[in-house]
């Protein structure tokens, strides 16, 4: 994407909770949602190899349904190319968050806000099977444990490389970080362009969708939330 700065990392002191928010417990999703980050893979490399012929055949059927001739020179290998491309676009089904994080959680006496912003994100709209792309901003307040910074981008990659809606993607990222680190709070903001709104339908070229999930002190304390939002815009 043009005009998007490279991934940045910001560490700043967090605003202390004040008033009722300081006394209340952290806002957390339900247990069933929290456990979803540990879910098993739904697809393996072996599954890819076995399903590739049927996927390619399905694309051949699509080409015929569109009025094209799958046997003409330019389309002879298109079904296989499209099938392997779709497997790559959805490779997040082959990975588990727990495998990524197991060796990258470190005990550290650090309780100031950590932000990784402008993480490039590519996904597929589950309603129309067209791209969603944009940027993800993640912040969290450690509770004696920190996560390797590159792993935040890996979490984004695993969940975004699936058939998605932006609202669910935002929450899945926040819940995975919360469950893995048990931090004081987590904030996730996604800004994205949906090609289902650009190439079809309303065809609004410059529209963007912004979603956020705030957990713990990011949700309960306005000063902490405002600090996070200010830093990701700077």
Image (cartoon, rainbow, N blue to C red):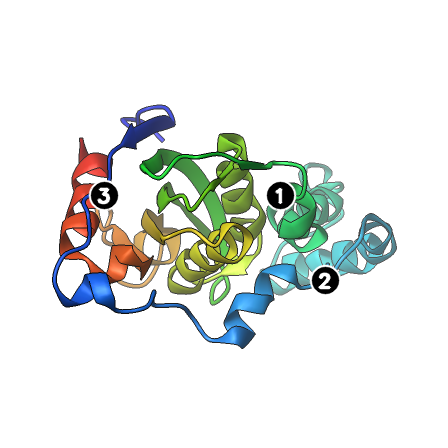
Q: Is residue 227 left or right of residue 28?
A: left
Q: Which residue is mark 3?
A: 228
Q: Which residue is mark 2?
A: 40
| Vertical order, 9 against 24 (above or below) | above
Which residue is rendered at x = 14% and y = 57% of the image?
18
Q: Is residue 79 left or right of residue 191?
A: right
Q: Earlier in the sequence, mark 1 or mark 2?
A: 2
Which residue is rendered at x = 51% and y = 50% of the image?
181
Report the quarter where the N terminus lies: top left
- Residue 129 visible: no
How far apart marks 3 and 1 lie (CA) works out to 24 Å
How far apart marks 1 and 2 lie (CA) works out to 15 Å
Badges 3 and 1: C-beta atoms under 8 Å apart?
no
Which residue is rendered at x = 21% and y = 61% of the image?
22
| Vertical order, 102 against 218 (above or below) | above
Tell me residue 11's x, y (percent).
Answer: 31, 30
Tell me residue 144's x, y (percent).
Answer: 46, 42
Mark 2 nearby-residue class (10 Å; few <14, some 14–19, many ≥20): few
Circle 2 SS class: loop
Q: Which residue is mark 1?
A: 101
Report the quarter where the C terminus lies: top left
* Residue placed most toward the observer, 127 or 42: 42
How far apart marks 3 and 2 lie (CA) works out to 32 Å
Circle 3 SS class: helix
């Amino acid at each position: 994407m043009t005009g998007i700065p490279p991934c940045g990392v910001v560490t700043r002191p967090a605003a202390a909770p004040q008033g009722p928010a300081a006394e209340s417990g952290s806002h957390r999703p339900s247990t069933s949602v929290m456990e979803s980050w540990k879910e098993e893979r739904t697809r393996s490399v072996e599954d890819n190899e076995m399903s590739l012929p049927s996927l390619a055949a399905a694309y051949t059927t699509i080409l015929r349904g569109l009025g094209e001739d799958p046997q003409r020179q330019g389309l002879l290998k298109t079904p296989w190319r499209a099938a392997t491309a779709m497997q790559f676009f959805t490779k997040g089904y082959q990975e588990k968050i727990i495998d990524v994080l197991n060796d990258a959680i470190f005990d550290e006496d650090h309780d100031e806000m950590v932000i990784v912003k402008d993480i490039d994100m590519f996904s597929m709209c589950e309603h129309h099977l067209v791209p969603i792309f944009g940027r993800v901003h993640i912040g969290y307040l450690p509770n004696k444990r920190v996560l390797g910074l590159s792993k935040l981008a890996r979490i984004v990659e695993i969940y975004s490389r699936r058939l998605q809606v932006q609202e669910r993607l935002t929450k899945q990222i926040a819940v995975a970080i919360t469950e893995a680190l048990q931090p004081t709070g987590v904030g996730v903001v996604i800004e994205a362009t949906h090609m289902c709104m650009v190439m079809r339908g309303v065809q609004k070229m410059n529209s963007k969708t912004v979603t956020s999930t705030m957990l713990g002190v990011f949700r309960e304390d306005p000063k902490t939330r405002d600090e996070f939002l200010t830093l990701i815009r700077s």
